[in-house]
Image (cartoon, rainbow, N blue to C red):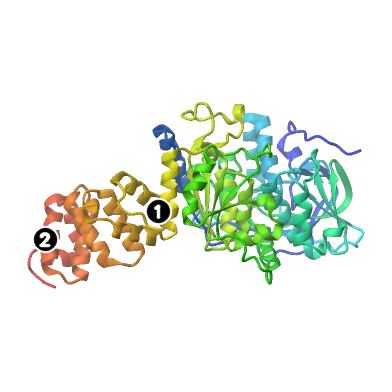
Amino acid sequence: MVNDKIEYKLPPEDFFFTAGVDRSLCLLQTPEWLWRPQAPARISGFALSKFAQINTTITAKIEMTKGARKFTRPIEFNTVPAVLENAQFVKWAVNLGGRWLLNGAAGTRLRNRYAWRNKDEGERQTVAHFAALSGENSPVHLPERAPMPPLSVPVALELRNGFNFYHFVSETLPMLAVLEPVAHGRDVYLHYDGTPPRPFMRAFIEALFPDLAARVKFVETPARYDRVISCYNFEHFYFQSPEHVMASFNEHAPKSWAWTDRRADGAVLGTLNMNAMDVGLRLLREKARQAIEGHDFSYLPRRFWVSRENGDARSRQMKNEEAMIAALRPFGFEVVHFEHLSPLEQIAIMANADIMASYHGAGFANMLWAGPQARIIEIGTLQTATIRWGMFLPLAHASGCQYICAFADHNTRTPQRAPDYDADGLVPVAIYPPAIAALGLFVAALSGALPQDLGRRDLEQLSRMLLEAEEFAALKSLLEGQKPGKLKASPDLLRAMVRACDEEDDPEGAFVALKLLWACDKTSHGPVERLAWLSRRFELQSDLHRYLSDYEAHFPDRFTAFVGRAPWFGKVHRGEVSL
């Protein structure tokens, strides 16, 4: 008899399956690596609420994510084909011999729900259980290798559900990409719970896995197999194994409250999920981009806004969408609907995109196909900044695109108040005229249509947005095109100009901006110290004397420390040497 329930009240040692101890899971190949660091995508976010308090909270969330939860390099985990014995597929999870397998996104859901159901005491017991497994005396080893089963043994995978595009693209298709080499000639079962799978799932399988498609069958859970081929991802194994089995990647993690190496609590797991990706994402992306080679997709736009059909109950339409589209059209934007495009067209439009923009939703899973030249702009809310931002970060890392999040407002009767997710669910986005104007100016700058004659407030806001997005060339061009008086009156703009010049390797421009900055703001020693260094670089004797004197007059203690570190400047200041 097949069990159709997940009994969360079991103690952790009886609830969680331990790979490398129980032989119900064996690998079909020995992995060459378990994890490896990858180059990060460019990821940025800024607040565009019309309410000051909401903006303050959004900005704090962004800064916390960047400071406390961001790895220096994202971690790619390996996933390999595996043989499962006595396997039950229940809902969206896999049970092996009575215990639940921690594997990929399904394992994360299991771990989170187990914590929610068992509260503080259950969480403490779970953390202690995993600490024992990852300790020096752990019995855990790398799962053993098994011979390839006969073709009569099928392949089986779990679906999160039968309707969500994001989960299908980011979870199920990557596993299928990993399993494709061993799946030929076998039946392939994809397991769903409740709602029958939507047609797009079959369409993507036929487009990307044509040799397997005829043997792929959707099967409702629960289902049981004496023996089946699936795959195993090593992300959760990191917390179930000692360091001599799976090496630490702590050197890439932040030194903050959000990370304690190998401690399997909610904060640590949440931080890792934002910085981790599955090798299956890369394999799927490569396969998808190969599938569009040789086809003509020149009719698809390179700058586009993704809208959704009003009839979709889950689309959560954005308030003021038409006004946002109107602000983008002057820069070559067209409106597209992903649901009107074939799978290969969805892949191609993202692969060739210059700028794609839309509001928060599952369609951003298509970011996986984007090229490194693409700028992907998502309009979200404080709610998405808090609980949803991390979901899409692995897709950005896997594609290498630029992912820009503009966090606006909630479409509620009281948008100035943050909604309660437990009570209200995920609330749709609203964007109001000031934010529409700001985002329109931002896109104009990205498009090379640099706005002129902006008021100081708008210019400072646009500069902050470009600075956050690391669009230094556009920022430098924007500020160079303004009347000099605007920059002289704004220390913030001058600091932005200095940063842009530094990033664009323009020390002369930085020198000019620093002079103006020092003239209007003498509250920090940084500008005058840099002015001294640049005066030396450009061999400007009189400037060097002036700025050393200014440094000593305004910051005597710091100046003493400075000439202690760089004695040559002290000799210049005393007239002992010259340029």
Q: Give how far across and how far down residue 400 sits, in percent.
A: 55, 61
Q: Secondary structure at mark 1?
A: helix
Relative height, residue 449 to residue 310 (above, below): below
Q: How busy is the neighbourhood of tag 1: few (under 14 within 10 Å), some, or many (20 plus)?
A: many
Say which of 35 and 288 sits in front: 288
Give the mark, 1 or 2, whose residue is nearer the N terminus.
1
Say which of 121 and 515 sits in front: 515
For residue 144, say whether it is visible: no
State the separation of the CA atoms marked 1 and 2.
33 Å
Work out which quarter of the rendered image holds the C terminus and state it: bottom left
**In the image: residue 491, left or right of residue 466:** left
User: Three-letter amino acid code at disc 2?
Assistant: Arg
User: Three-letter amino acid code at disc 1?
Assistant: Leu
Q: Give how far across and how far down residue 159 sits, in percent.
A: 76, 46
Q: Give how far across and how far down residue 128 sits, in percent.
A: 63, 39
Residue at figure coordinates x 52%, y 59% from the top left: 40
Picture quadrant where residue 475 is located: bottom left
Tell me the residue that label 1 is attached to: 466
Residue at figure coordinates x 79%, y 59% from the top left: 206
Residue at figure coordinates x 57%, y 55% from the top left: 396
Tell me the residue that label 2 is attached to: 546
Say which of 424 and 12 sits in front: 424
Q: Secondary structure at mark 2?
A: helix
